[in-house]
């Protein structure tokens, strides 16, 4: 079954439908499950070598099959998991991707079925290297661990808010869900200086089978950084347009953070201070974070100071937690329209166009319909989501390519849901062969995965986690994945891996 790779949730009748088959499968047949009668017969495309998986494969296009029902695809000596064609194959997916953020809530009594628990991490945090205590309760646990880190939080918030902005049909509970995180982020700002603490966590990661309320070690607030302060400023300025009642508070917080950035032009990049061993989220440069902040603040206020800052610097790209420039471009192109500068607008469009080309080129030749090339790094599934998100956001600026961009984004969803070289659905609880053992403490503690979580995906640097090293050393890049609870570089989950995939679901309106 695993050699026939396709979207295990299914396809809508009018969708392009493609499966990736082994080399020997020149022809294929699709049979109805009820009576085994043939619904479709086809010839697969010529075999091609797929470098990331090291395999030679063929693509089978069965888009012409528009009949609703449940089928099995037969090719050579293999047969597929069930193939579903119906009007609503993604039912429940979008909701689960958003509900996940509820499961990650910190600091409150949490009712969420099997994984319910009393309020966690409620003690005051110690400001690193001092005796000072601060209340920074609330927010979402970042990932499979219980740290709360500002930089990736800003990405998750931005993705969810942009999803809300661009979704043809909006989720009524989204703004409340995101406010929970924004409220925590506001607490992470130092009132005196406007700088934002990089993160709050214990000194160490605790046992993998520990529920949140059982992690009772001291909470430590790590030093203020420019990356935390800039991504904070950006996401607060963005949030100001979604929460009209809180606009004043959000813009004031963003402005104060900007003032800190202005006063600290050469702040050092974050490194875990002595004695702290939790997630680092360090960076090589804060220029893209400052760029994003300036773009959002300009879009929100029209204040030329921010415009000047943007004009004097470079244009940046990226939707990752450590490269965030595309968020800035999007803010400028969509929201600075009445006060923009034609030359800068063109430069931003050019930069966006280049990024889209860098996504579409590898995608076009990929037998799995994904754009990673060989970028199967830690969190590769985030890149899948980010690339789809970039294309969806770019559509209005390149109308002649908009349809291709939409199709590419949908293909990226198919990849995540099973059309990939390991035949896993990378979203827990969805598909015939989903990840069952994510590196997620509440899931490990209860022996059952929380549904709707996007796992990290293949990581070709197998030496980055011991379980991956044990199970996948020597594997080709796109096959370096093991569904094992210990594999934190491939099978962990995070708020900012779910958020771009939620964006895809919401904006594709599936
Ligand atoms: O992109 C570069 C690539 O250009 C380069 O060739 C390659 C060679 O090392 O590295 C690639 O970067 C990788 C980067 O992720 C990609 O975003 C790094 O190797 C890799 O170490 C880095 O991993 C990060 C990881 O923390 C370790 O720092 C992940 O992005 C990040 O998502 C992850 O975050 C952790 C938190 O620290 C703790 N909480 C869980 C969370 C998820 O696992
Ligand atoms: O659980 C931790 C995970 O969230 C991180 O991404 C990962 C890398 O920083 O570390 C995990 O914690 C492991 C630690 O690094 C080493 N000892 C085993 C821990 C997992 O139980
Ligand atoms: Zn907690």
Image (spheres, rainbow, N blue to C red):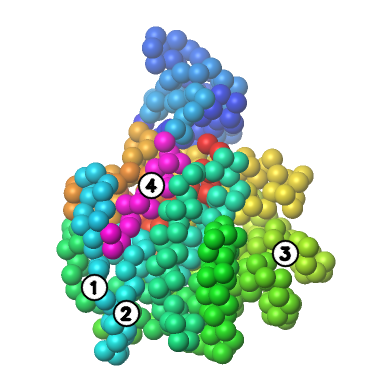
User: Does the rendering let one see residue 390?
Assistant: yes
Q: Is residue 33 above or below residue 322?
A: above
Q: Quadrant of residue 285?
A: bottom right
Sequence-first disc among 2 and 1: 1
> Crowdedness of circle 2 by 10 Å Cα count: few (<14), some, many (20+)?
some
Residue receiving disc 2: 134
**Residue 187 or residue 330, whichever sits in front:** 187
Q: Residue at 47% across / 75% down in the picture?
A: 228
Q: Is mark 1 within 8 Å of ligand 3?
A: no
Q: Is residue 51 above or below residue 425?
A: below
- Work out which quarter of the rendered image holds the N terminus and state it: top left
Image position, residue 479 (x, y; %): 40, 50
Q: Which mark is residue 99?
A: 4
Image position, residue 409 (x, y; %): 58, 44
Residue receiving disc 3: 336
**Residue 16 or residue 23, whichever sits in front:** 16
């Amino acid at each position: 079954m695993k050699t026939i790779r396709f979207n295990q949730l299914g396809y809508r009748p009018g969708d392009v439908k493609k499966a990736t088959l082994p080399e020997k499968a020149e022809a294929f047949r699709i049979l109805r499950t009820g009576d085994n009668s043939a619904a479709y017969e086809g010839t697969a495309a010529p075999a091609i070598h797929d470098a990331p998986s090291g395999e030679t494969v063929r693509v089978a296009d069965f888009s012409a099959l528009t009949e609703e029902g449940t089928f099995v695809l037969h090719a050579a000596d293999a047969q597929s998991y069930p193939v579903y064609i119906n009007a609503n194959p993604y039912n429940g997916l979008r909701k689960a991707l958003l509900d996940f953020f509820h499961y990650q809530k910190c600091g409150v009594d949490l009712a969420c079925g099997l994984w319910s628990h009393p309020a966690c991490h409620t003690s005051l945090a110690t400001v690193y290297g001092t005796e000072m205590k601060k209340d920074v309760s609330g927010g979402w646990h970042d990932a499979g661990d219980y740290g709360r880190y500002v930089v990736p939080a800003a990405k998750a918030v931005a993705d969810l808010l942009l999803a809300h902005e661009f979704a043809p049909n909006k989720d009524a509970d989204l703004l409340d869900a995101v406010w929970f995180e924004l409220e925590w982020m506001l607490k992470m700002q130092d009132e005196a200086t406007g700088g934002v603490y990089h993160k709050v966590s214990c000194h160490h990661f605790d046992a993998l089978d520990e529920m949140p309320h059982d992690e009772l070690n001291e909470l430590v607030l790590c030093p203020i950084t420019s990356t935390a302060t800039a991504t904070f400023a950006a996401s607060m300025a963005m949030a100001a347009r979604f929460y009209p009642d809180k606009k004043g508070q959000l813009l004031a917080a963003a402005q104060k953070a900007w003032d800190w950035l202005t006063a600290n032009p050469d702040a050092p990049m974050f490194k875990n201070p002595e004695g702290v061993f939790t997630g680092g989220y360090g960076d090589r440069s804060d220029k893209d974070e400052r760029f994003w902040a300036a773009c959002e603040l300009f879009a929100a206020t029209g204040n030329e100071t921010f415009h000047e800052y943007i004009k004097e610097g470079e244009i940046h790209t990226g939707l990752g937690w450590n490269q965030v420039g595309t968020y800035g471009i999007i803010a400028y192109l969509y929201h600075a329209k009445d006060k923009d500068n034609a030359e800068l607008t063109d430069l931003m469009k050019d930069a966006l166009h280049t990024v889209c080309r860098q996504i579409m080129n590898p995608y076009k030749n990929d037998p799995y319909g994904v754009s990673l090339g060989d970028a199967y790094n830690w969190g590769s599934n985030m890149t899948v989501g980010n690339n789809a998100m970039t294309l969806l956001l770019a559509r209005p600026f390149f109308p002649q390519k908009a349809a291709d961009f939409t199709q590419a984004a949908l293909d990226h969803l198919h990849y995540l849901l099973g059309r990939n070289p390991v035949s896993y659905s990378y979203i827990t609880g969805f598909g015939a062969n989903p990840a069952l053992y994510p590196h997620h403490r509440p899931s490990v503690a209860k022996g059952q995965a929380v549904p709707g979580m996007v796992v990290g995906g293949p990581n070709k640097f197998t030496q980055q986690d011991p379980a991956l090293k044990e199970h996948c050393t020597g594997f080709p890049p796109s096959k370096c994945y093991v569904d094992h609870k210990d594999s934190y570089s491939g099978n962990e989950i995070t708020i900012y891996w779910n958020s771009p995939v939620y964006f895809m679901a919401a904006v594709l309106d599936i």
